[in-house]
Amino acid sequence: MERFFRQMQGPNAATARRGGVILASLLLSASATMADPIRGAGSTFAAPIIAKWAENYEQARMDDGDFSSPDWTVDYEPVGSLAGLMRLDQPELDFAASDVPVSHEELAKRGRQQFPIVLGSVAIAVNLDGIEKGGINLTGPILADIYLGKIKSWADPAIKTVNPDIAFPDLAISPITRKDGSGTTFMFTEYLSSTSPEWKATHGFDTLIAWPVGRGVEGTRDLIRAVQATKGAIAYADFGQVERANLPFAAIGNKAGKFVKPGPEGVRAAASATVWDEAKDFAMSLTDQPGEGAYPISGATFAIVSTKIGSNRVGRVRDFFRLAFENGSKDAEALGYVPVTPQVVSQVVKYWLKNDTAASQ
């Protein structure tokens, strides 16, 4: 529009400007009527990075201009992985984000596609005086016994055994849990199941758990607040959000018998033992992977897209994540996540093309 103004000279310039303003108003009105944001819902674990990518996406599509369209925005609701997958049946939703990989068979039955978008770790946050970040050691069996209600005090001998240099107070442990359908709950209980036969037999792993003990809250934000407000509390949440809340967290025992802190380094070590298979829609767990440096409560967030929403809307979702893959790695790292590697991105792009070819035949 500015170029159009510059090209007009003399007495016609004012008329041209008035016409340009009217034309711009009409275009904005039409755009507002016809355009829609990309709509997603699901994982609270990945909500901070999806929000950042959404901001970047709009700026990139504006291309340093002043005009934005709803088509260039992303409306994401952090309602939990389970709720996100359930909402994918609603026609207005473009994608769900889930920390729980959906099986190839389930995706095929429902006409959906799945690919990883970011990796991360679940931290075990505590509210204990004098404990630094990563300054306390905990194991899977100890965590299972805490959430089974068998270990009730921070002065319990089992905790003292793996922390001989810490003088724990005789303070009650207050477990905090998620009561909404959460992928973080899935990753945490998957780890408990892999290290505690009793937990596996009595509760297993899922997005919703009937917790034997503890106080349930909805969403990561409320969970963080509950830990901050409760002396002696313990809880599980996305590492980046625990870190930004400045909460102490535990180093967790892995398969190699090493205590590893949550964070990017441990997630990379866990992911290095993983083979991503696009033929199976990338359904893969990073929990309790081998390797001395592997953090055992690691996981991935997946985007799940229904092919029933039409190729144009599927293409918009892919465009959003393509830009995130290309330009969003530093933002992911700044928020405590681990970007998917270029090799995995290449696999994802091949997966898109393969599914497009199959759909057109």
Image (tube, rainbow, N blue to C red):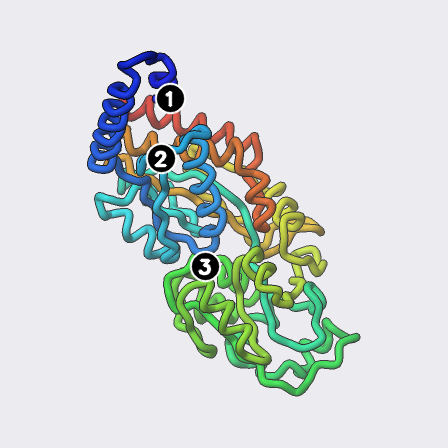
Check residue 129 in the rendering and tell me which mark sits there, or answer none: none
The residue where tag 1 is placed is 2
Q: Amino acid at mark 1?
A: Glu
Residue 248 image offset from top left, x and y in percent: 64, 67
Q: Is residue 361 shown to the viewer in this render?
A: no
Classed neighbour count for the residue bearing mark 3: other residues with Cα under 10 Å, few (<14), some (14–19), many (≥20): many
**What is the distance, in whole Å, between disc 2 and disc 1 at their CAs?**
16 Å
Q: Which residue is mark 3?
A: 186
Horizontally, residue 328 falls left or right of residue 42, namely right
Q: Nearer the viewer, residue 230 or 356?
A: 230
Tell me what residue is drawn at x 21 percent, y 44 percent: 91
**Vertical position of residue 187 compared to residue 274: above or below:** below
Image point (28%, 35%), residue name: 307
State the image quarter where residue 316 is shown. top left
The residue lying furthest to the right in this view is: 165
Q: Which residue is mark 2?
A: 68
Mark 3 residue type: Phe
- Mark 2 or mark 1: which comes first in sequence? 1
Look at the picture and state if 26 lies above or below 143. Answer: above
**Which dot, 2 or 3, sits closer to the camera?**
2
Total label count?
Answer: 3
* Secondary structure found at label 1: helix
Element type where label 3 sits in the image? helix
Q: Amino acid at mark 2?
A: Ser
Q: Is residue 319 visible?
A: yes
